[in-house]
Amino acid sequence: MGGERPLFASHDLKLVNVTITAGESGIKCCSNIEAENCLFEGKYPFWHVNGFKIKNCTFAPGARAALWYSRDLEMTDTVVDAPKMFREMESLRLERVKLNDALETFWHCSKVKLEDVEVVNGDYLFMHSRDIKIRNYVQHGNYSFQYCKNVEIHRAKIESRDAFWQTENVTVYDSEIDGEFLGWHSKNLKFVRCKISGIQPLCYCEGLVLEDCTMDESCNLAFEDSSVKATVNSPIISIKNPREGYITAQGFGEIVFDENLRKPGNCKVQVKNP
């Protein structure tokens, strides 16, 4: 099927081994849709859809901006080669999905659950999204999770500069986070048993917590102007002007407190007992 809106306003429909070819808005203003072993080639195939399941499908590069203004999605065992997926959506669950060109994906979404998902070329992921739960996740892409609220992540490997900027209520467990300028301007950002890499991490944070984390030798000038409670199971190459709280680590290469330290300026820095 191709052309303009071939299945417009369809309801209670199951598609098996169907190809949506060149055109626009193949499945628009629909409800209760199931797609299995389908190929989507045309632009904007799922817009304004209420209740749909996508299984063992492929979204070709031409199927850009495929899922917008929709709700109640279950997507499993699917490959996505198109950018700008998932905008203005509510209640979506992805399992065993690979997104190979995830530029500007998951914007303004809520109630998102991801499990066994891999993201490639994922710059600007999850802008202004909220209520997100993620497990077993791999991501390559910068500027991720900016302005997000209420996020919980388990067992992830995230390569992203400027990740978690200006977020609120984010907790990350048992993960590796690699990228400079991590978590700036965040509120209530927490890392538990995580490995952190990248220059100048975790500055201008409010309510920052690190529990049993490690920070590699790239993590210089950390915690500037942050309110922080950190227990780090490694040395920290340098810290600069943490505002309040405490930082406990196995050692410190450099500790900077200068005339630019902001009040209350009472952060305790201490070497962890052997």
Image: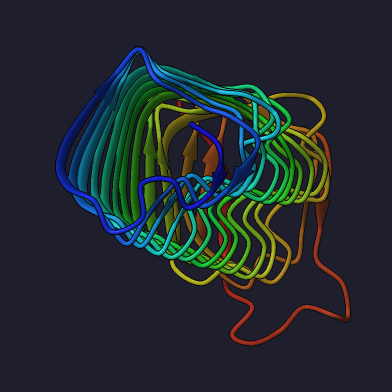
- Residue at x 80%, y 49% (from the top left corner): 200
Residue 139 visible in rendering: yes
Asked if 255 appears above or below 53 in the picture, the reply is below
Residue 90 visible in rendering: no
- Residue at x 83%, y 41% (from the top left corner): 199
Q: Is residue 30 left or right of residue 166?
A: left
Q: Nearer the viewer, residue 13 or 75?
A: 13
Using the rendered view, name the quadrant where residue 99 is placed: top right
- Residue at x 73%, y 64% (from the top left corner): 224
Q: Position of residue 195 (x, y in %)?
A: 56, 25
Q: Position of residue 107 (x, y in %)?
A: 53, 59
Asked if 49 appears above or below 178 in the picture, the reply is below
Q: Is residue 201 left or right of residue 150?
A: right
Q: Nearer the viewer, residue 131 or 226?
A: 131
Q: Is residue 113 left or right of residue 136?
A: left
Q: How many numbered dots are placed on residues in this image? A: 0
Q: Position of residue 241 (x, y in %)?
A: 75, 66
Task: Give the colour scheme shown.
Answer: rainbow
Q: In this view, which residue lies farthest toward the bottom?
A: 263
Using the rendered view, name the quadrant where residue 117 is placed: top left
- Residue at x 69%, y 62% (from the top left corner): 203
Q: In this view, which residue lies farthest toward the right?
A: 259
Q: Nearer the viewer, residue 26 or 238?
A: 26
Q: Position of residue 189 (x, y in %)?
A: 45, 57
Using the rendered view, name the quadrant where residue 216 is placed: top right
